Amino acid sequence: MNLAVNTIADTGVLQVEQLGFSHGKAPRVFAGVTFSVKPRETVALLGASGCGKSTLLRVLAGLEKPQEGSVRFLDQPVTQPHPRSALVFQQASLLPWLNVADNVSFGLDFRHQPRISKQQKEERVQEALTAVGMAAHAKALPSELSGGMAQRVALARALAREPQLLFADEPFSALDPITRAEMQNLLVDVVQRWHTSALLVTHDIDEAILVADRILLMGGSPAKVIAEWPIYLSHPRAHHTEAVHSLRNQILETFRKVSGGADFSEQIHSPAHNSEEIPRVLNFYF
Amino acid sequence: MKSVLTKTLLPLAGLLVAIFLWWLGCWFLARNTPIAENLSPLKAFPVLFQLLGDSLIWEHTVTSLKRVLVGLGFALAIGIPAGILTGVSWRFARATGPLFQFLRMISPLSWMPIAVMVLGVGDAPVYFLLAFAAVWPILLNTAAGVAQMDKNWLLLSRSLSATPWERLTRVILPAIAPHILTGVRLAIGVIWIILVPAEMLGVSAGLGYFILDTRDRLAYHELMATILLIGFLGFLLDYLANRLRRIWIAN
């Protein structure tokens, strides 16, 4: 298995430079965050609960303004949510008064969205619902769906916008393990079919390994990217038991070293690391 | 069988017992005060049917129902925007909280003399009193609806770069519609209670006016029949408001 560190090459779909953010006068949530997402690449932002990765995602999606650094999406500075990026949350958050199809097409006709014809809209909805296996439930109401089905619709809602970049914030962590495994495979599948990039925020190491082309480990206070692993295993990865297991151990070990022995599930307050130190950390472990 | 018993027979039995007690009360009263015989259910029901056969009571009823609608309309026009503002802006909620609680606890009827003085004799002060009474349940329910909204819906609309108008009409209003309809149901109840006394001053039509009219004519059998009618109509209004709310939630 090749675990060589991939330097940021190409101009990415998303370029993040020295990004820092704090809520008002509170201590910074994260600082000096630098990375990029390449076209059609799935990147997992892995970190312990409460480490600031969800906040980072909101800043990247243009929902919050950073105090430091810059975010560029498709070579444009991000100042507000971009029509070609889409969000999936931990909760499906479907609108209960709209049926499944109307939930998927919700917002496509908003004023700041690209103009599309009624027929295009219906095609997109149909395509997205078929891709997530919910075409037969187009007329169903959200209250009639299970958690997994609702999350499928939420994914379809994001796909219907034909995004260049899919932001997903712990999208499957509220689901049971079997449904979660199904949804992880589905995510890999639709990301490939839609030729989109994806940025997945997760605290689940296995999820990151199973889904992503590259894992960025976040930690510290303020949080930053402390290590990075490209993954060259073919899908479905659940078949590569040994490689997955060994990578999981590496990630855990790295996390323990950086966080001074803290448990992965705990919120961590490690001594600050400069982003310049990342290569050293990585060299040490590979 | 059991459901028929509990759903239909029990309420019916309760009503029959109440009517019997009503009759019994009138019978006792009539032994010393013969005029109380006019209040008995044995008179009230036949007289009610007699009244309904005449157009006069219908005119008063239509007048009263029109006032209910106009009062409710004003209450909605003020209550929904103020409720949304309260739910959206904590500053507005803080600034208006004690004021609203203060105004809410004043019986709307206390404003009657001032209302007549400012708005003149006629329908206007009645509309004012009804709207003033009905605005609070609508405002408070609307604000609660906004506060209970899934915050991800707002995040979703922001991620779609929704304009404020799109956010209001496509997310907030549909989301709080069930709460508004709960508010409407409560508001109709309050309006119906306030309506009768409000119509007892400065107007020459409506069920409240008719109550005083029967008293002045010493037509106590008609008075009791009108009270029955007011009860029926109130029951019906509440039933319709609840049906409306249920139909909306089911869709």
Image (cartoon, coloured by chain):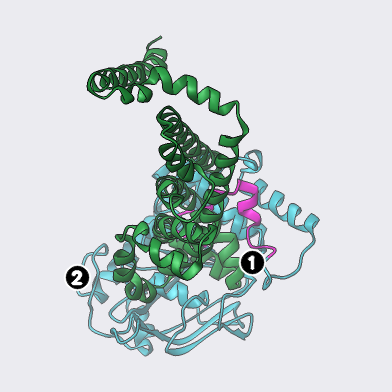
Chain colours: A cyan, B green
Disc number placed over residue A261 in the picture, else none: 2
The answer to the question of whether label 1 and label 2 lie on touching residues, with beta carbons closer than 8 A, is no
Compare residues B146 and A229 and report the one nearer the observer.
Answer: B146
Mark 2 crowdedness (10 Å alpha carbons): few <14, some 14-19, many ≥20:
few
Q: Residue at x 76, y 68 (%)?
A: A115
Compare residues B182 and A115 and report the one nearer the observer.
Answer: B182
Q: Left of A127 or right of it: where is B186?
A: left
Magenta-drawn stretch, dominant element (helix, strand or loop) = loop
Count of labels in the image: 2
Q: Quadrant of the C terminus of chain A?
A: bottom left
* On screen, residue B24 above or below A200: above
Q: Which residue is mark 1?
A: A163
Q: Any magenta on residue A105?
A: yes
* On screen, residue A117 above or below B23: below
Badge 2 marks a residue whose secondary structure is: loop
Residue A6 x, y percent position in the rendering: 50, 77
Protein chain holding label 1: A
1 or 2: mark nearer the eye: 1
- Gap between marks 1 and 2, in whole Å? 39 Å
What is the magenta range? A88-109
| Quadrant of the rendered image containing residue A106 | bottom right
Disc number placed over residue A136 in the picture, else none: none
Residue B35 x, y percent position in the rendering: 33, 25
Q: Give the residue type at disc 2.
A: Gly
